[in-house]
Image: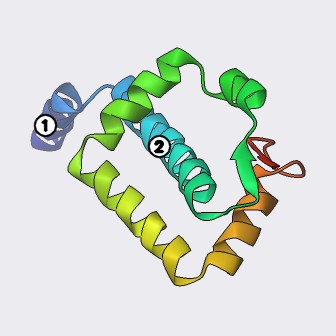
Amino acid sequence: MIAAALLTANVEAHAAPKSIATEVTNAAYLHARFTDVFVAVDRCPKLTVDIKRWDQEMPTSAMIIVKAFNATEQGAAWYGKRDADFEADPAKECADAEKWYGAEGMGLLKRK
């Protein structure tokens, strides 16, 4: 029992603070949203970013995190994967992007 308590205390002492895990999760989420929106703008000729809404949802502090995450191997791989998805089936991906990020979704995209 003492060994288990010491092991638990040791693991807890060396675990990353919850705030770091939360920040990494948030960065991944913001990066995924950023990726979908900007790949959609590149691949879907009828869609553009609603800049006013974008600036409300993605302030400069969030964009710094997104850009840093984009520079990682994982971030670059996700961007490449989503770009390939759009290239493989543009009609489906553009419709999905408009649904999730358009006027009826998050409002980050609008029709040109």
Q: How is the image coloured?
A: rainbow
Residue 38 % position (x, y)? 56, 49
The residue most toward the bottom is 88
Residue 23 % position (x, y)? 42, 29
Amino acid residing under circle 1: Ile
Q: CA distance from mark 1 to mark 2?
A: 44 Å
Q: Residue at x 40, y 27 (%)?
A: 65
Q: Is residue 34 above or below residue 19?
A: below
| Residue 40: quarter of image | bottom right
Query: Is 59 on the left or on the right of 100, as rendered?
Result: left
Q: Residue at x 43, y 34 (%)?
A: 66
Label 2 element class: helix
- Binning the other alpha carbons within 10 Å of mark 1 as few (below 14), some (14 to 19) or many (20 upward) gives few
Instruction: Return the residue at label 2.
Output: 31
Q: Is residue 29 above or below residue 51?
A: below
The residue most toward the right is 104
- Among numbered discs 1 and 2, the one appearing first in the sequence: 1
- Nearest the viewer among 21 and 70 is 70
Q: Is residue 90 above or below residue 3?
A: below
Q: Residue at x 49, y 16 (%)?
A: 61
Amino acid residing under circle 2: His
Query: Is 70 on the left or on the right of 44, as rendered?
Result: left
Label 1 element class: helix
Instruction: Return the residue at label 1.
Output: 2
| Residue 79: quarter of image | bottom left
Which of the numbered marks, if any, corresponds to residue 12?
none
Q: Is residue 49 above or below residue 68?
A: below
